[in-house]
Amino acid sequence: MEYVVIMAGGSGKRLWPLSRQGEPKQLLPLFNDRSLLQLAYQRVLKVVPASRVLVCTGASYADVVADQLEGLLPENILGEPEGRDSLNAVAWPAAVLAARDPDAVMAVVTADQLISPEEAFAEALSNGMRLAADDPSVLVTFGVVPTSPHTGYGYLHRGEQISGYGMAAEVVEFKEKPDLATAETYLASGEYWWNAGMFVFRARTLLEQLEVLHPVTHARVLELAARPDRLAEIYPGLLKISVDYAVMEPVSRGEASARIAAIALPVEWIDVGSYEALFEVLSCDTNGEATIGTVVDLDSRDNLLINTQEGSVLAVVGMNDAMVVRTPQATLVGPLSASQKIKQLVEQVAAEVSEELA
């Protein structure tokens, strides 16, 4: 049986103050009154029914997730007591699914990206599921064909092609985020894809690799699947590490029994991880202004203007290439080009003002 796990944890600090603790970016209705999570759910329903979709999210968001995703079964919402990075957001659902269905094939997708066309995404996901079902020894990841020498993404070095599953290939090596010169070399070679951070594998295969590479984590997630009442006790003690570092990269180096394959995602793939990225995907008026909420601007151009304070107006005059974000708790003002510094700013707010406002 095929399943999809949507990873929907994290707080999205780079979209502060719009996204804060308790109000993560993936739950905000930014796209025609729909959230990133709702868009991700809509995409995967083209591949599996709602009954076979699981969402791994923060425990405090579980009620909001249930409200946003019509048809999602209550038992398929896995609420983390605290974030312990992506390994556990993958391994815990794998243990749950393996207990329910020993032959479960599971796709793992993220809830913080915009992907189009959806049909191409669904076809790639289906190809990945067929490959994992046909060959239990393979862990499938997905690559986006690069269109620029991007330095903000990890890369997959492709090897021998695999026929019968769309545009698929063995993975020779994972590469960390490169400098510009290295990224240009990757692009020119045609042998590299951006690492999309999404996967397909048999749940049991993932757990077998985990048993070799991180036996303590393996034992604990199996216990969580058998004893969900111990979640608050066990989960905070799990090793905090990404699934790439913990499993995918070691497997690619031959440190466990599986092998890695990649399938191309022939899609437009946007990681909404900053205000610059959000500005690029929102519709703009004739002055290049992207706005949300009640906003008035005069003699201004190319700004991102967001006002979530009901009963108020955000008014801007003579400002260009800026971001102004007003919420009931905080107001952010700065050049759009400084959006990558917001995470550092949030830490300063927490230290100098209040963690509750960060």
Image: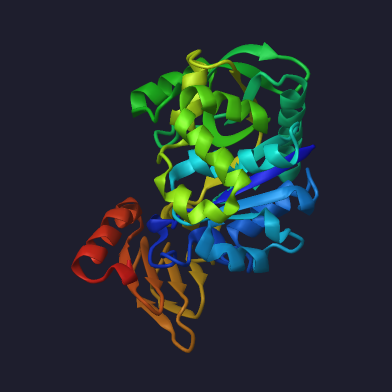
Can the viewer see residue 64? yes
Could you tell whether 285 is left or right of 3 in the image?
Answer: left
120 or 131: nearer the viewer: 131
Q: Is residue 12 left or right of residue 191?
A: left
Q: Eyeballing the image, is 266 above or below 159?
A: below
- Provide residue 335's location: percent of width, then percent of height: 31, 60
Q: Is residue 50 left or right of residue 341?
A: right
In the picture as drawn, the residue positioned furthest to the top comes out as 160
Q: Which residue appears at 73% of the width and 59% of the height?
A: 73
On the image, the x and y values in percent for residue 340 come to 34, 51
Q: Residue at x 73, y 19 (%)?
A: 135
Q: Quadrant of the N terminus?
A: top right
Q: Nearer the viewer, residue 176 or 217?
A: 217
Percent across and percent down for residue 272 are 50, 51
Q: Residue furthest left?
A: 352
Q: Please give the name of the residue rendered at 66% of the width and 69% of the height, measured from the top-left corner.
A: 67
Q: Residue 13, located in which quarter of the rendered image?
A: bottom left
Residue at position x 22%, y 71% in the image = 353
Does residue 280 appear in the picture of this structure?
no
